[in-house]
Image (cartoon, rainbow, N blue to C red):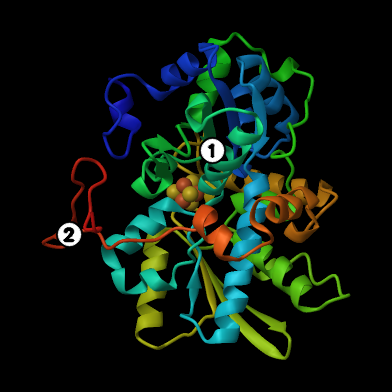
Amino acid sequence: GQCVAVCPTGALTVKPEVDRVWDAIHDPEKLVVVQVAPAVRVAIGEEFGLLPGEKATGQLVAALRKIGFDRVFDTLFTADMTTIEEGMELLGRLEKGGRLPLFTSCCPAWVKYAEQFHADLLDNLSTCRSPQQMFGSLVKKFYAREMGRTPEQVVCVSVMPCTAKKFEARRPEFTTGGVPDVDFVLTTLELARMIREAGIVFNELEPEMFDNPLGMGSGAAVIYGASGGVMESVVRFITAHRSAGDVGRVDFYPVRGIQGIKEAELEIGGQTLKLAVVNGLANAEKLIGRIKAGEVFYHAVEVMACPGGCLGGGGQPYPNNTASRLGRMKGLYSLDRAEQLHRPQDNIFVTRALERWFGGPANANTHQALHTRYYPRRRISGKPVELNGRRDERPV
Ligand code: SF4
């Protein structure tokens, strides 16, 4: 079918994902929830005549409700949760002398690349699940129960700028008892197709708000969609976390922009942290080469596979060029400025959820639901091999 062309693993062969999402929406037995990644909101408008980066969040929410999703939630919620868990992980490694640099792990294309080509670095990767997968885990493990439903009765759909997120959602680690945490992943372009199929006039929609409690995010979560955004969010978290009473810093410009490799230093608690941000796997390869050769040292490294970060993802509208990426990037940072909250720990929906479901952040309970493991993947004569779409060398 036409799906094979866009599916990175070929595992989807029968019905296009869009049609399967329509089926779920039309199934009266199912509660269908949707989460939307940050980078989608500054790009989907391009499919309906808006400029890259032009604000369309409210119309996007309205369109998702009109399409028939029962709850319209925001991946921003779990982006804030990711920052808190990952920030705590970085602080823990700094204090206890753990593996450094800490590499971010929310880009599945980077994670898979590390599994194939840099298995010796897998212990450096943050154990945090990506925001998409934290979201799916929360929906199936906690939200479903609170709604009086079983995990099977709740369908979790993601809208992502990314085709690799489809692969991530099918990783066996993110399936419990045969039920995936995230059932379907739509790209920005696929959602635009659904909006057209539903006959919705996007530009004429009255803006609407996300549902709660899983629909609230800080400005730190919005900027996840841009290269450097995860690092800046972690900086916002740890500076405020480490200096009680002080609000910490918010804008952290050295990690912003679309250049391939960015470096920054952060003074914190009498220590100078060395940070690096890369986008594009060729740039990651360059940086890893320098790290392994001992030419450079960093405490933390953010890696995104796409140029400019997720805003330049493979599921975004065309043209997906430097001009449109710069527009989307500007859009994300202006959304951050417009938010009332700029640090993940100020998002009380997130801190309350961490308290209620796990007894607080970064403990044994969050480890089960919000973290993961990585596995070396098989290669033959230097080339990566996909077996059955997702087989690898992990223990059975
Ligand atoms: Fe997906 Fe690209 Fe973002 Fe990685 S950087 S998560 S591949 S959109």
Can residue 256 be seen here? no
In the drawing, does residue 70 fall left or right of residue 177? right
In the picture shown, does residue 282 fall above or below 324?
below
Percent coordinates x, y for residue 125 in the rendering: 44, 68
The label on residue 210 is none
Residue sitting at the far top: 199
Q: Residue at x 41, y 65 (%)?
A: 283
Q: Residue at x 27, y 25 (%)?
A: 13
Q: Residues within 10 Å of mark 1 (few under 14, many from 20)?
A: many
Q: Residues within 10 Å of mark 2 (few under 14, many from 20)?
A: some
Q: Is mark 2 within 8 Å of ligand 1?
A: no
Can you identify the residue that label 1 sits on?
Answer: 140
Q: Secondary structure at mark 2?
A: strand
Can residue 250 be seen here? yes
Percent coordinates x, y for residue 375 in the rendering: 31, 61
Of 348 and 286, which appears nearest the observer? 348
Of 361 and 3, which appears nearest the observer? 361
Q: Residue at x 60, y 8 (%)?
A: 199
Of 394 and 293, which appears nearest the observer? 394
Q: Is mark 1 in CB contact (under 8 Å) with mark 2? A: no
In the picture shown, does residue 35 fall above or below 199?
below
The label on residue 379 is 2
Quadrant occupied by the C terminus: bottom left
Total marks shown come to 2
Q: For the residue marked with disc 1, what is the amino acid?
A: Lys
Q: Earlier in the sequence, mark 1 or mark 2?
A: 1
Percent coordinates x, y for residue 82 in the rendering: 60, 57
Mark 1 and mark 2: Cα distance apart in space: 34 Å
